[in-house]
Amino acid sequence: MEETINHVFRNRTATYKDRLAVEKKRSGRWDSATWNQYYDRSRAVGLGLAALGVEKGDRVALLSENRLEWLYTDMGTLGIGACLVPIYTTLTADEVAYIVGNAEVKILVVEDLVQAEKALYAADKYPALKTIVAVEAGNLTHSNLISFAELMQSGMDAHRADATMFENKADDVTPDDLATIVYTSGTTGVPKGAMITHKNVMAVILALDRIKPGFANDADQAVPFLPLSHVFERAAGHFYGMYKGITSSYAESVNTVLEDFGEKRPTIILAVPRVCEKVYQKIHMQVEQQPPWRQKVFHWGHSIGTRISTLREEKKPVPVTLKLKYKLAFALIFKKLRQALGGRVRWMTASGAPTARDIILFFNAAGIQVVEGYGMTECFAPATMSNLADYRIGTVGKPLPGVEIKLADDGEILIRGDNVFKGYWKMPEETREAFTEDGFLRTGDIGVFDDAGFLKITDRKKNLIITSSGKNIAPQKIENLFLSDPLFTHFIVIGDRRKFLSALLTINLDQAAFIAEKQGIAFKDPIALLDHPEFIHIIDEHVAERNLHLARFETIKRYRIIKKEFSQETGELTPSLKIKRNVVQEQYADLIDSMYMD
């Protein structure tokens, strides 16, 4: 019986041996590992860490982008019974130092020179950090620093001395032992370390596997591009992919993902809503640049696809004439979308935030089913998931097998099951506050169940807008409506305790330039359009058009344009590309106040 991820790793290696397991594209070339190589290298890392003094329960931190060494470090750390602490490379030196100190990290593995400098800063503040292991650090030398190659060599030497050491340590791990501590982004205060056990990991994997029809099998190919430091990619991609024997070819970067899709032709894609939105917006922007007759063909095909997707969702028969029209629409329109994603994708996720219905219908019409799900760090990612054969767009599916969900009196979603975390590291008070008296996790999300038991997320409890007139408004519904317009890249609804709704928004400059040229508006640089009276009038029209689809109290009365794109580096976006509302509202407080001056 497989009770820990260590058991899964050893068993899949025994099954697949010399078959390709993982690969990563770097500088245009694929570095790869078979299952045997994956296991051997992970074992070398684990035993190398043990030689440095890492014992069962100790914390090893990992500060790196996706690469094969990330995977080796993860599985090697878990294999010796230690606990892995992933850290995002976008964090500052002070933030890294806080996590290292709070988690009492003994060894920190870093990717390169930039991250090594953050690590050395952390070591100066926290002497308990004994060793820094650098995959690539150039000519940097320091008494605390060793190379990843040295670490692996030490582990290989240990294996030669005792060929059963790694397996014995792996077998000593129990389901209740910590596998990882994942720190929240800290957008509302001090980062909290969520303690995830092997039981939590296995509960998610086994629950996903119990959903029928199955999501994956060992013939599937994935091209992951989301960060492994995020629980969604680590749980649903890395660990579940390992459980099912999937081959994972990690993309070189987010910017090369379409090229990598074309080369490796994935059958499944793990994505977040923002990725789906960007693809959808890009396609519509390209259509608007086509001759009128091509635009008419696209919109005709789009409408056919929407009807087909809706009938599939409702499990209704498709009329013969509509089937024939759809075949033509697929050949003219939707086949190109499939080809852009490699031509073999069966399904892709859009988890982490609500996704506009029009976008999901569009992908579904291309034969790429969009799987919506819901979860959080504290329940190791998914707690609900759409079923490939039974789904309702706009919901996040039904609870995973073994997961119990109920709603509090105020609509807050409460979760209980073996997937739910152990608590926050060294934060007993916060841990107590995270649970109800009967052991349910307080999610902070508001939801409702429909008549068939599908869960729909209406908003974050703390994000719910209550206007000065007492209207309760869920901003994400409004934001999704506006984001289906290719002109907008981000849209944040404002209005809590205010007399009306307003918005902060960013503009797609490529789309802006296209519209301006089409309207005969002269400009030297697209950014200048954001101050051009004629173009501002066009933005007004786009806002007014979207307002037509909203109740009067939900409409956007005023807006302000943010002239720079939000990003992780500047602090407005999380690693899963979600807006940090409180950060944005704090940064632009004066701009927000200006909309309510009279």
Image (spheres, helix red, strand yellow):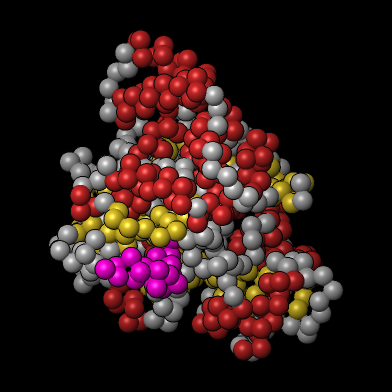
Q: Residue at point 36% right, 14% down? A: 322
* One can see residue 355 in this view: no
Q: Residue at point 19% right, 59% down? A: 472
Q: Residue at point 31% right, 13% down? A: 319
Report the side of 282 relative to 360 (left or right).
right
Counting from the top left corner in percent of width and height, residue 493 is at 34, 58
Would you place residue 436 above or below residue 384 in this image? below
Counting from the top left corner in percent of width and height, residue 6 is at 56, 58
Would you place residue 301 above or below residue 209 in this image? above
* One can see residue 586 in this view: yes
Reply yes or no: does residue 589 show up in magenta: yes
Q: Which sits in the foreground, 22 or 344? A: 344
Reply yes or no: does residue 562 show up in magenta: no
Report the side of 163 relative to 408 (left or right).
right
Magenta residues, as a range?
Answer: 578-598
User: Toward which corner of the image does residue 311 lie, by quadrant?
Assistant: top left
User: Toward which corner of the image does residue 20 lie, by quadrant?
Assistant: top right
Quadrant location, the C terminus: bottom left
Q: Which sits in the foreground, 277 or 467? A: 467
User: Toward which corner of the image does residue 136 lie, by quadrant?
Assistant: bottom right
Q: Main SS of the magenta segment?
A: helix
Task: Residue at the far right: name it.
Answer: 139
Q: Which sits in the foreground, 429 or 515? A: 515
Counting from the top left corner in percent of width and height, residue 221 is at 59, 38
